[in-house]
């Protein structure tokens, strides 16, 4: 009884909303500024290439990046299905969707590693020109965010296996999901602004 | 006498308890179901297909950029409103996130115009 009262008290906040969720949304709002700065810097310097060094048109492989964009986009679907599963109390499906999301995230990261390796082989490094510097910093930061997301997903998967992720902890899955979807929307912007716009059109 | 019996025997003596103040519970957000999520994902996939298709069409650069930005906006909004539940959750979350987006757009568009990366 006392435990229940304490639990109810702990969840009651002055806004009537979860403080953790407000915190995550505030964090994501601040992340908009971080990625805004990185994207703007890329847009400012993408044309600053030295003669004879790789340019976006020369190194980008749009069909390849389109596939990895699609993979990340679909990982948002599996993430939200994981949340729907825990809200229904279906823990087997929760684990399946969490693992699917983590695997799709890993596929995206593996694709990024391959892309970076290919760019380096074609002569584009962090130090080659300002296009290279801003491109690697922007996409590298995004990749680091995806990697952190994968670690969080695998932690949730482990917690679920241990029986430490009950239906009452659905909010934890929702918060990790918010972060994961944010990483996805950042890539939606990067794919358009960094990959498609500079090299496409007449 | 154990505590339970003691409490039962004294129940009649106790003054009627005041009804607890009604605490307004947060509105339980009704999130969509898996079928709706899949429908949104299909739209996202189609939009991505259109984006990539546009890339190979030889259309004027201004129209190309405008269409790509439109598709990106649609995809961004679908993920934020459905998958992140901003359409269904409290307005406070929406405002918090909008503050970040509007601030970032304002600051960095000004920077891009000042440094000549964008022109009116």
Image: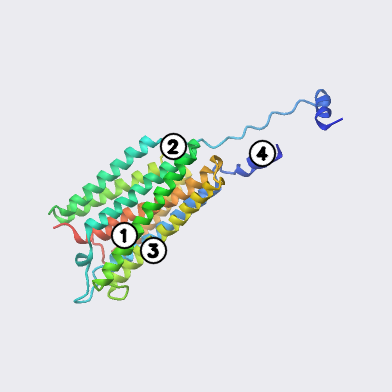
Sooner in the amino-acid sequence: mark 4 or mark 3: 4
Residues under numbered marks 4 and 2 in contact, where contact means CB atoms less than 8 Å apart = no
Q: Nearer the viewer, mark 4 or mark 1?
A: 1
- Say whether residue A93 is left or right of residue B25: left
- Image coordinates of residue A9 in percent, x first then y, are 65, 42
Q: Secondary structure at mark 4?
A: helix
- Image coordinates of residue A7 in percent, x first then y, are 64, 42
Q: Nearer the viewer, mark 1 or mark 3?
A: 1
Residues under numbered marks 4 and 3 in contact, where contact means CB atoms less than 8 Å apart = no
Q: Is residue A186 visible?
A: yes
Crowding at dot 1, Cα within 10 Å, few <14 / some 14-19 / many 20+, comes out as some
- Residue B31 badge: 2
- Report the Cα–Cα distance between label 4 and label 3: 43 Å
Q: Secondary structure at mark 2?
A: loop
**Quarter containing the C terminus of chain B:** bottom left
Residues under numbered marks 1 and 2 in contact, where contact means CB atoms less than 8 Å apart = no
Residue nearer the viewer, B39 or A164: A164
Residue B102, above or below B44:
below
Q: Which residue is mark 3?
A: A141
- Say whether residue A83 is left or right of residue A110: right
- Image coordinates of residue B102 in percent, x first then y, are 38, 53
Q: Which residue is mark 1?
A: A111
Q: Nearer the viewer, mark 1 or mark 2?
A: 1
Residue nearer the viewer, A175 or A64: A64
């Amino acid at each position: 009884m006392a435990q229940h009262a304490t639990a109810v008290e702990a969840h009651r906040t002055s806004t009537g909303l979860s403080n953790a969720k407000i915190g995550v949304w505030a964090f994501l709002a601040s992340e908009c500024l971080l990625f805004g700065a990185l994207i703007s810097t890329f847009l400012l310097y993408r044309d600053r290439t030295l003669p004879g060094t790789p340019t976006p048109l020369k190194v980008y492989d749009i069909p390849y990046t389109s596939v990895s964009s699609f993979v990340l986009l679909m990982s948002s679907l599996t993430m939200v299905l994981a949340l729907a599963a825990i809200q229904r109390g279906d823990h087997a499906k929760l684990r399946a969707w969490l693992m699917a999301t983590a695997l799709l995230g890993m596929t995206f990261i593996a694709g990024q590693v391959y892309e970076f390796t290919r760019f380096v082989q074609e002569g584009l490094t962090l130090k080659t020109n300002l296009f290279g510097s801003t491109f690697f910093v922007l996409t590298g930061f995004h990749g680091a965010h995806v990697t952190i997301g994968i670690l969080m997903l695998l932690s949730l998967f482990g917690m679920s296996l241990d029986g430490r992720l009950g239906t009452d902890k659905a909010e934890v899955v929702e918060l990790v999901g918010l972060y994961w979807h944010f990483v996805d929307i950042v890539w939606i912007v990067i794919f358009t602004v960094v990959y498609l716009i500079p090299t496409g059109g007449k | 006498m154990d505590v339970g019996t003691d409490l039962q025997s004294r129940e009649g003596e106790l003054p009627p308890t005041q009804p607890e103040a009604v605490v307004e519970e947060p509105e339980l957000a009704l999130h969509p179901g898996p079928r709706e999520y899949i429908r949104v994902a299909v739209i996202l996939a189609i939009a991505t297909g259109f984006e990539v298709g546009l890339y190979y069409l030889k259309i004027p650069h201004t129209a190309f950029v405008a269409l790509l930005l439109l598709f990106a906006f649609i995809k961004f909004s679908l993920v934020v409103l459905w998958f992140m539940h901003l359409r269904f959750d409290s307005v406070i979350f929406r405002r918090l996130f909008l503050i970040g987006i509007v601030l970032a757009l304002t600051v960095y568009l000004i920077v891009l115009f000042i440094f000549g990366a964008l022109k009116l």
